[in-house]
Image (cartoon, rainbow, N blue to C red):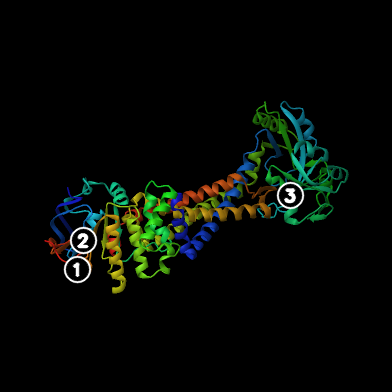
Amino acid sequence: MPLIEIRNLTKQFRKGDDVITPLRDVNLDIDERDFVSLMGPSGTGKSTLLNQIAGIDRPTEGTITVNGLEITQLSRRRLAHWRAEHVGYIFQTHNLIPVLTAYENVELPLLLLPFTRAERRRRVQVAMEAVDLLDRAGHYPRQLSGGQEQRVGIARAIVTDPTVVVADEPTGDLDPVTSAQILDLLQRLKSELHTTLLMVTHDIEAAAIAERQLRLDDGRLVESAVHAAGQGEPVC
Amino acid sequence: MLKFAPYLLKTLWRHRVRTGLTVSGSAVALFVFCFVDSVQEGLHRITTQSDSTLVVFQANKFCPATSHLPQDYDQIIKTMDGVRDVVPIQVFTNNCRASLDVVVFYGVLPEQVQKVRNFDLITGSWGEFENNQDAGIVGKSVADRRQLKIGDRFSVGDVTVTVAGIFASESRSEENYVYTHLDFLQRTRGLDLVGTVTQHEVFVDPTFDALKVASQIDDRFRAGPVETDTRSKGAFQASSLADLVELIELAHYLGYACIGLMIVLVSTTTFMAVQDRIKEHAVLQTLGYTGLRVFSLVLTESTLMSLLGGLVGVSLAMLTLASAGLSVGAEAVSIAFAPSVSLAVSGIVSSLVIGVAAGILPAFQAARTEIVLALRD
């Protein structure tokens, strides 16, 4: 049984007099521990689909079931609780809280879960170590480089050990060298943490590190390639 | 909520100029609110005094300078049923009109002062007071205001007294009075009032109906040489302060205006803070923070600002009220601006309520953030 089941998903919204349909009757299954990249031209609904799966947006029609729970039926409050427990979100622009240190930023999602202070500290240290930023724990976002900020963002996304990690253009704001480092990091974390990772990207090279590559074209989903993790060649 | 304390405090600190200005504005508003409230409290204290003390005044006279009752009325009143004691008092004041520096002299038989007033003599001696005709015991507020100490001679109008003692009283308005010998005040140049007094203070046995005793007194002197008007001390003081009461009632609205001003101020700051952080609130909600959690974070922020301003304003007001010994008086009745626990509690509770009220709308706005739209911005 797939971890994520998307059925007949349609998303429409109004822009003035026009009705825009970024997602049209999308069906998709994502298995546990899959690493899926989602590509497509701007405005084709990649981020919209990601946001539906992350539970921060609601579809106009259709259902999304994650681990047997139909999240499209959840109330706003229950959906927030579900996100806290099951979703790690990596933003394109890092979106760290500027007044908090790297440590406190990573700790933020844990404050919502029933962990003791000691357990929170242990988890933050593990996450910060995983992104190799333990020595920057006391630094504020303004004291970090773009790549370091994104690594803190990644640590914040994995610290709760979520069911699924979603990344919206995680390298979109970074220079090529830093982008490559972040992609390496994502790949390493994926293999070490065995988490399910869904990544939206413009970058073909970034998309290539995923096991499954999907394309969204005019609101419809097209499977472009499936290959073994860490290999460049498609297997089917 | 303690877990979120670093986030809340650091958020307030991030915009420390804005936070500081809001806290200062709130402090000023609460300072004024406490001042206005202290006048209200003082007025309430003196107009709701025990009904078992009556004041006998000359009928149809409203100023102490014009009330002249025979001193020997006290002997007649003493014989009436329910009367425990009678104190003839000659009143002299430097100003019958409303003033912030009223000095009121109460000329009383010296041996009666200790008996009918529960004064705590801070410095000086009762003996000095009782044995020297021109001696006076001075209320603490007057002594502070005029920087008087034992042995000092001070004059108000034609009255010159030597300070024999300084007293504190549970009734803060009493601390604005100076007690002298009755004879001394009656004989003061320009007064020449031997044999007459301004009023008689009558202490009624609590088991008797004081109002009936008051009627009995007025009935007794209706056909006498001078007609009397007897009322409970509270009612008498309220009537003496009638003009001021209206002003004080008006000042009450100033207190409400301060509250309103503070709500608007804190609310505006919180709104600005929310507007600045729409994306931040969207990020928090993406991480799993519920709308209710974001609501409570914003509400706590506004409450903290308001409470901090309240604490500063209330503390300053209490310090000022305690040290300045201010009072306002008219017709020889004085209202003390005094600090009190109830005043401090009401100020702090008000600042808490203001913080919550001011934060509700901005908090609601933050809680209803459309995550995707806010993240896109």
- Chain ID of residue with mark 2: A
Residue type marked 3: Lys
Q: Earlier in the sequence, mark 2 or mark 1?
A: 1
In this view of the protein, can residue B371 be seen by the observer? no
Q: Nearer the viewer, residue B225 or B88?
A: B88
Residue type marked 1: Ser
Residue lying at the far right of the rendered structure = B131
What SS does tag 1 mark?
loop
Task: Verify CB contact (< 8 Å) between mark 3 and mark 2.
Answer: no
Q: Are marks 3 and 2 on the same chain?
A: no
Find the distance from the CA under tag 3 to the CA under tag 2.
88 Å
Q: Quadrant of the C terminus of chain A?
A: bottom left
Is B18 on the left or on the right of A18, as rendered? right
Q: Which residue is mark 2?
A: A229
| Viewer-nearest of discs 2 and 1 | 2
What SS does tag 2 mark?
loop
Q: Which residue is mark 1?
A: A42
Q: Are marks 2 and 1 on the same chain?
A: yes
Is B271 on the left or on the right of B350, as rendered? left
Residue drawn at 74 percent across, 27 percent down = B80
